[in-house]
Amino acid sequence: MKEKLTIVKVGGAVVEDEAQLKQLLTDFAAIQGRKVLVHGGGRRATQVAARLGIESQMVGGRRITDEQMLEVVTMVYGGLVNKHVVAMLQAAGVSAIGLTGADGDVIRSHRRPIKDGIDYGFVGDVDKVENKTLQRLVEGGMVPVLAPLTHDGQGNMLNTNADTIASEAAKALAELYDVTLIYSFEKKGVLSNPDDDESVIPTITRTDFERYKADGTISGGMLPKIENALAAIESGVSRVIITLATQIDGNHGTVIH
């Protein structure tokens, strides 16, 4: 029987709110067994870019990353946000180590090709996650904290959606562990009505998702999140849950089947 491993992805407004982030990391520290944390930071990157006079462009919930924006996200994701989270985990008694995909060659990707006339710029689509490298860290008592940055093996950093990082890491680690993937953010789950925080959809299958996408119930940044969740389930991840950042115990939110 495989040992259990939990991957928690935190993003959205939670990373920006110090009190929410501290509570999430306290709850994360209490999770028993092997674990990995993946963080976003898109809102912070947008704020920093704006202060530098750089406009943020989004298409379908994904960021267009030109050379200037690549510098911003590398600084913000790999530096400011990652090291802040790592420092807070150390304070919570967790032996954390912050990583981008380039560190230890842990996540390699290729630059996304132009599709349907959209050039995403320096955005990476994941080719490989070195699960044995992550395994060595977690078996050694470390907790990897993954920033949403990868590399192409040719010396170039690439911006990669944090939900994708979480999904790809979960898929790779599912070969070695019984993996639960938890996407945590500022809502209680996937909502049928974005104006009603209680309208949580309890379960979503691939068929459900296609229907919700077609009728507009699910849109924007939630689309790639659920695509990644479904891809994880279809590749052997045991459980995927989308839930509130203060409810990462596995008993709340939307379960993806």
Image (cartoon, rainbow, N blue to C red):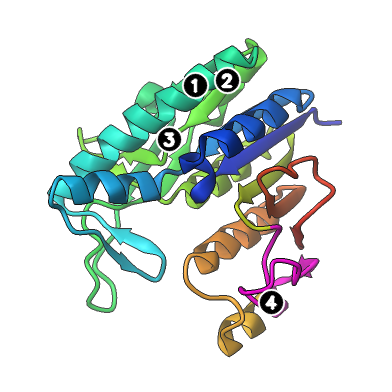
Which-is-in-front pick, marks 3 and 1? 1
Tag 4: amino acid: Ser
- Asked if 132 appears above or below 230 in the picture, the reply is above
- Asked if 21 appears above or below 103 in the picture, the reply is below
State the residue position of label 1. 86
State the residue position of label 2. 89
- Asked if 56 appears above or below 115 in the picture, the reply is above
Around disc 1, counting alpha carbons within 10 Å, would you say few (fewer than 14), some (14 to 19), or many (20 or more)? many
Kindly tell me whether residue 87 is visible in this rendering: yes
- Identify the residue at image location x=64%, y=58%: 187
- Identify the residue at image location x=41%, y=23%: 83
Q: Where is residue 227 in the image (x, y as percent from the top left)?
A: 56, 64
State the residue position of label 3. 147
Q: Does the magenta run of residues contain 206? A: yes
Q: CA–CA distance between discs 4 and 1?
A: 34 Å
Q: CA–CA distance between discs 1 and 2?
A: 5 Å
Chain part drawn in magenta: 188-208
Which-is-in-front pick, marks 2 and 3? 2
Which badge, 3 or 1, comes first in the chain's sequence? 1
